């Protein structure tokens, strides 16, 4: 996104710079005299600055319904005045048609879609008339060329911004999908916890009320119910721990399924080879942690488009390899706390964790001899 943002910005800003360069070259001929040249230069500076300013604004989203009509009209009037003045000094002032074209481009980029065509048509007609179509002997040349020039300039600027706007919307959609996946997992965990604990808590509450009523009336029964409350509490605590352990230590197959869902929601094509059920049960939580850490690294520290998970169980050697094609060279070196923790956990069972940040991407490999 950062690279595309820079490319888009320099493309539209470069169009404004081109206007300044072309008109400056025309002014360097000296045909506009000592008075006209500085006036035209002032108009060029104003239009170029306004173009850059509003193109930057449009990169936040096309059609923001900008209502600075007076400012836009004033800028367009300056551009048309410069074009008119140039038209009196040259038959067809082609370079100066770029000034109103730049104004039209940044205005339509900040207006809703319904009004853009009207602005382009009216602006192009005004620029054509100001350029001297009625004074020029070459009516066809002075009519067709300005229309083509203005239309091409506006189309080129808007095409760049339209593509950037589409990518921006896709990126926002991916972020929303990632957040939704996290929210769904939290809701699933909350539902599991509620289903398991709800009846225990209700039973404890009822037993507690009954015990309170029996105290002083039937102490033996109250003592029995109090023991049952304690047992219910211990059962609830044990099952809570089981839920949390099941959540944190899901099977390798479950972790891979979750990882594939999250990565695909982020727009990353993911392929899995091998069978997770071949991994011995005691090692599944360990490799599940590897898959979680690898997935987190792909989402946070890469620009991956594709990711591959390969599971291999052969001759007592178990390995899981996660590879993505989006390794970032601008990330600081180092394993980080997540990978350091993985290395320690694998080391306790005689395994190892390796990373490979080669030119074709980033690979995280965990292996253990079972």
Image (tube, rainbow, N blue to C red):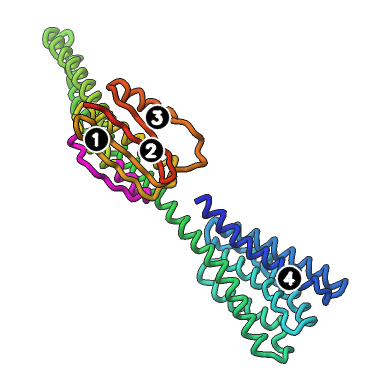
Give how far across and how far down residue 240 sits, in percent. Answer: 24, 25
Residue 140 shows up from this direction: yes
Residue 169 painted magenta: no
**What residue is disc 4 on?**
23
Q: Quadrant of the C terminus?
A: top left
The image shows residue 46, relative to residue 185, as above or below, that is below
Q: Check disc 3 and report its element: helix, strand or loop.
A: helix
In 3D space, how far apart are the residues under numbered discs 1 and 3 (Cα atoms)?
Answer: 18 Å
Tag 3 or tag 1, which sits nearer the N-term?
Answer: 1
- Mark closest to the chain's N terminus, 3 or 4: 4
Gap between marks 1 and 2 measured at Cα: 16 Å
Magenta residue check for 275: yes
Residue located farthest toward the right when viewing the structure as drawn: 34
Pointers 1 and 2 in contact (C-beta within 8 Å): no
Sequence-wise first label, 4 or 2:
4
* Residue segment shown in magenta: 259-278
Task: State the separation of the CA atoms marked 4 and 2.
Answer: 52 Å
Q: Residue at x 70, y 68 (%)?
A: 75
Provide the residue designation for mark 1.
Answer: 252
The residue singled out by tag 2 in the image is 296
Tell me, for residue 338, which label it has, or none: 3
Residue at the front extreme, as displayed: 315
Based on the displayed image, in which of its 4 quarters is residue 300 positioned? Answer: top left
């Amino acid at each position: 996104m950062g690279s595309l943002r820079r490319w888009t910005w320099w493309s539209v800003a470069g169009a404004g710079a081109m206007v300044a360069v072309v008109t400056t070259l025309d002014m360097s001929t000296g045909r506009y005299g000592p008075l006209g040249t500085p006036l035209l230069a002032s108009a060029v500076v104003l239009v170029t600055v306004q173009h850059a300013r509003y193109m930057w604004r449009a990169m936040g989203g096309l059609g923001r319904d900008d209502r600075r009509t007076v400012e836009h009209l004033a800028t367009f009037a300056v551009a048309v005045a410069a074009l008119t003045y140039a038209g009196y000094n040259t038959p067809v002032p082609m370079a100066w048609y770029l000034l109103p074209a730049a104004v039209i481009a940044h205005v339509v980029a900040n207006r809703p879609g319904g009004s853009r065509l009207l602005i382009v048509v009216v602006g192009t007609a005004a620029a054509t008339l100001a350029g001297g179509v009625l004074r020029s002997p070459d009516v066809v040349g002075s009519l067709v060329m300005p229309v083509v020039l203005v239309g091409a300039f506006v189309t080129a600027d808007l095409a760049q911004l339209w593509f950037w706007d589409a990518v921006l919307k896709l990126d926002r959609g991916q972020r929303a999908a990632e957040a939704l996946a996290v929210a769904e997992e939290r809701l699933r965990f909350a539902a599991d916890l509620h289903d398991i604990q709800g009846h225990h808590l209700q039973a404890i509450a009822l037993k507690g009320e009954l015990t309170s009523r029996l105290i002083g009336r039937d102490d033996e029964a109250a003592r029995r119910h109090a023991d049952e409350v304690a047992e219910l509490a211990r059962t609830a605590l044990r099952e809570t721990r089981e839920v949390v352990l099941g959540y944190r230590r899901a099977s390798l197959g479950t972790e891979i399924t979750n990882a594939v869902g999250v990565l695909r929601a982020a727009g990353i094509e993911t392929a899995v080879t091998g069978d997770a059920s071949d991994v011995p049960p005691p090692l599944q939580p360990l490799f599940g942690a590897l898959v979680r850490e690898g997935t987190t690294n792909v989402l946070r520290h890469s620009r991956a488009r594709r990711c591959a998970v390969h599971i291999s169980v052969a001759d007592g050697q178990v390995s899981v390899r996660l590879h993505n094609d989006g390794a970032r060279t601008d990330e600081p070196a180092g394993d980080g706390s997540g990978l350091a923790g993985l290395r320690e956990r694998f080391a306790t069972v005689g395994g190892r964790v390796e990373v490979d940040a080669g030119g074709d991407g980033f690979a995280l490999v965990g292996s253990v001899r079972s």
